[in-house]
Image (cartoon, rainbow, N blue to C red):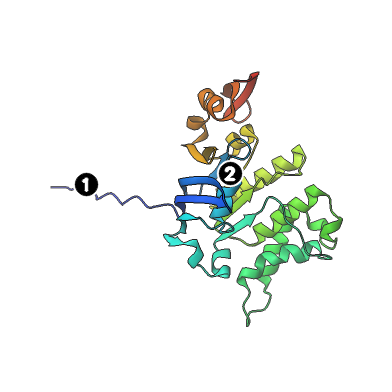
Amino acid sequence: MSTLPTPEPLRAPRLRAENVTLRYDQRVVSTDLSVDIPDREFTVIIGPNACGKSTLLRSLSRLLRPANGRVTLDGQSLDTFKPKEFARQVGLLPQSSIAPEGITVVDLVSRGRFPYQKLVRQWTPADEEAVRGAMTATNVAQLATREVAELSGGQRQRVWAAMAIAQQTPVLLLDEPTTYLDLTHQIEMLDLFARLHRDGTTIVAVLHDLNQAARYASHLIVMKAGRLIAAGPPAQVLTVDLVREVFELNCLVIDDPASGTPMVVPTDGRWR
């Protein structure tokens, strides 16, 4: 008599926030917030301004410690990781960064390899290849010897992205990665992150453009006023009712003629 195989237990996501309260001093942003980040997915966090998107991302990167609850990686609270140990697992492209005075592009991108350096370990060909590949992928190789301070905002954003990519982490967090970029470079950057996702990297990004979010994300997290409103595939999450509830906007949601993903078309302005 044959027996059915025992199904494997569902595995918890590597990165998750569990009942966290997030605040800056006395200003509370989120209370009792729980969010799972699916492994090997391209997750995009969307929501209106000041809803807690970037605050959530800061907690996932351990830049912001929860006042209550915990954020975990592989079941282990983030604050128990040593800095280099965590930096080999989770990379971050912050919303805005300040480069050290006088630093060149190649030197800044090379800092992405810092988590792999040890007292007895010198710079290796693997480090060199990671830096070169990241600079090529972000189209900043021709800027290698320029000082970062001399660059335009869009160029600097691509240099910081190169540093994060050179870090070669299995999880990459992106806080508004298309800031300062023109439309062409926005698409190039998002295409690059999509390729990293296809290669197995878990991507988590904060985006404002709903149609870019729907086109690139495999998983959406929708927030409003510090709360989780919805989560799931864009085709299931991004609906007329949700856009009206979260963004207070009348719209149509149609199929994007190029990608087939949901496309939000505003109609007659604000709902209220």
Confirm or deny contact between disc 1 and disc 2 (CB under 8 A): no
Residue furthest toward the left? 1
Q: Which residue sits at x=72%, y=41%?
A: 186
Say what secondary structure mark 1 lies in.
loop
Q: Mark 2 points at which residue?
A: 53
Mark 1 residue crowding within 10 angstroms, few (<14) / some (14–19) / many (20+): few
**Most foreground residue, 100 or 170:** 100
In the displayed structure, 35 sits above or below 249; it is below
Marked residue nearer the N-terminal end (1 or 2)? 1
Amino acid type of the residue that numbered disc 2 sits on in the rendered structure: Lys
Q: In this view, does 90 lie above or below 38?
A: below
User: Of circles 1 and 2, which is in front?
Assistant: 2
Which residue matches tag 1? 4
- Residue sitting nearer the eye, 47 or 160: 47
In this rendering, does residue 28 appear at all? yes
Give the residue type that dot 1 points to. Answer: Leu
Outermost bottom residue: 120
Q: Position of residue 208 (x, y in %)?
A: 64, 37
Q: Crowding at label 2, few (<14), some or many (≥20) Cα neighbours within 10 Å?
A: many
Residue, far top: 268
Give the label on residue 115, or none: none
Task: Give the x, y percent position of residue 200.
Answer: 53, 52
Residue 267's place in the image compared with 51, above or below, is: above
Confirm whether residue 232 shows in the render: no
Q: Position of residue 267 (x, y in %)?
A: 64, 18
- 194 with respect to 162 (left or right): left
Which quarter shows the C terminus?
top right
SS at circle 2: helix
Residue at 46% x, 62% y is: 77
**Residue 22 x/y as whole percent:** 53, 50
Q: Distance between the residues labelled 1 and 2?
A: 44 Å
